[in-house]
Image: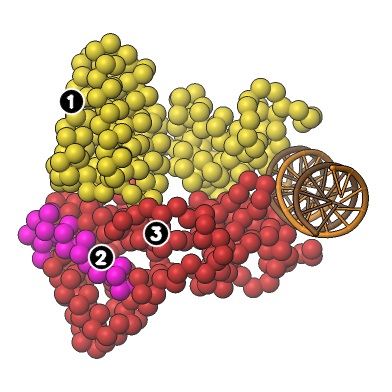
Chain colours: A yellow, B red, C brown, D orange
Amino acid sequence: MSGKRGLIRSGTTVDQMVRAIGDRIVTGFLRPGEKLDEASLAARFDVSRTPVREALGHLSAMGLVERRPNRGAIVAVVTQEHLASMFESMAELEAICARFSAERMTSIERRALEIEHQGSARLVQLGAEEDYEYFNTEFHSRLYRGAHNTHIYEMTVMTRGRLAPFRRAQFMLPGRLAKSWQEHDAIVTAIMRGDGNAAGKAAKDHVSIVSEASAVFAVGEQTKDASTTKPRVAT
Amino acid sequence: MSGKRGLIRSGTTVDQMVRAIGDRIVTGFLRPGEKLDEASLAARFDVSRTPVREALGHLSAMGLVERRPNRGAIVAVVTQEHLASMFESMAELEAICARFSAERMTSIERRALEIEHQGSARLVQLGAEEDYEYFNTEFHSRLYRGAHNTHIYEMTVMTRGRLAPFRRAQFMLPGRLAKSWQEHDAIVTAIMRGDGNAAGKAAKDHVSIVSEASAVFAVGEQTKDASTTKPRVAT
DNA sequence: AAGGCAGAAAGTGTATGCAATTGCCCTTCG
DNA sequence: CGAAGGGCAATTGCATACACTTTCTGCCTT
């Protein structure tokens, strides 16, 4: 179609498409299994098919969409099994990060972690879910960086991103805020002691609890082809 | 340019490009830091820029090339630091897979693992490096699958793939074959006992030893821009 | 002489057009 | 009446053309 596009913000067009389509997927506006027609998407966002194609490639690499050769793309269908496996992976990855953090964080990193963690106690008392969520993200990021391992960092961040849509409502649960802080406290304490194993165990327990809390919100299969899912994970 | 392209085989053109360029990178024909000009590559393989671009996107997602917006793509420069972090990640991932395998493998899977492992003893006595390498790959794949966790499986396979070019010469070292088998034996034994922790530790040790053996072959920085590498991992 | 600012050249990012493959529907035969 | 085969529409895959960004070169200014 014609020249300028309208509303969405900065960055290259492909990035805009990745964000736009990705958002619609993680917010559930585009439902799993839904067909993603290149031409329609291009028209919808008033761009050509080229950046849409490239964006679909990126999203495919991120695991948000599935691409069948010559047969178009669909929103990735996340099975219960795969979701469980991702949560379990997340617990293991966080455990590794916490363990390495306990062993490798510099004194500066330890101090920053401790200070931020103590500071966040106030947010719990106030019941400031929004702010605590922001702090929570920062807290975990510190753990990932503190592991001093770029590849594990990448895997962890990517897994966390893919789980984002399923973690949204976790802090809605009553008392979850205080409990989260206590679990963080166990991790911080272990890291301060330099006790890698304890830190890892505490982190794993923390994530496992979150995953159980989130599992409630994970919608079951709503597509017809449940036959393709091979039952596996025990958890 | 003109119609049919020549020699490379099946699959969509993009896949061919991914394989062609990817091969040239892992075999060292394209050196780290080398500029990847879309037009030149397109001309070199007698295709248009479009599939080349898409292939570069895929390779970027795989971590084989680096893409700077508006500034082209280069062969990914794997720093010593990042290489070390990948080997370390590999050890951790294999440990997880072995631990889960010990806890979750079906009796059928256990039996198959044991049988294959025992059968491979013959290859060690014969000193059949080629065949053992094939078995070795299969052995580890069984561990990955045996973990019964699709996401960990994906991460492990991807990491292993990225490390492939640096693992090539590991079995050249004298006595490595027999030692590898013994290490495998420790893993199998632990899995048969259902001892997850022992299996994990054995697997981690196994990979760690391999990484040390391979580190010899990891060439240091050979590009001029060593300034862009931020020092991190302690190891 | 050194620094910086045009202007041009190179190269990426996006748009559009064409070819090829796929899936669907209608026809035809058993 | 059902199934198989062929043609048609729709959609993806690839090629080419155009626009914008970056970079290099050379000249001008200080």
Which amino acid lies under the numbered mark 3 shown in the image of this protein?
Answer: Glu
Seen from the viewer's position, the closer of residues A51 and B209 is B209
Label 2: chain letter: B
> For the point 65% across and 36% down, which residue is it?
A13
The stretch drawn in magenta includes residue B207: yes
> For the point 71% across and 63% down, which residue is it?
B40
Quarter of the image where one finds residue B175: bottom left
The stretch drawn in magenta includes residue A173: no
Residue A180 in picture, x, y percent from top left? 22, 25
Residue corresponding to mark 3: B81
Is residue B128 visible in this depiction of the protein? yes
B58 up-or-down from D2: above or below: below
Question: Considering the numbered disc 2 on the image, is that residue within a helix, a strand or a loop?
Answer: helix
Seen from the viewer's position, the closer of residues B18 and B232 is B232
Is residue B150 visible in this depiction of the protein? no
CA neighbours of label 3 inside 10 A, class few (<14), some (14 to 19), many (20+): some
Residue corresponding to mark 1: A182
Q: In this view, does B11 lie to the left or right of A213?
A: right
What stretch of residues is rendered in magenta?
B189-214
Residue corresponding to mark 2: B208
CA neighbours of label 2 inside 10 A, class few (<14), some (14 to 19), many (20+): some
Q: In this view, does D9 lie to the left or right of B114?
A: right
- Of circles 3 and 2, the one toward us is 3
Decide: marks 3, 1 in contact (CB < 8 A)?
Answer: no
> For the point 22% across and 30% down, which residue is it?
A184
Residue B102 in picture, x, y percent from top left? 14, 55
CA neighbours of label 1 inside 10 A, class few (<14), some (14 to 19), many (20+): some
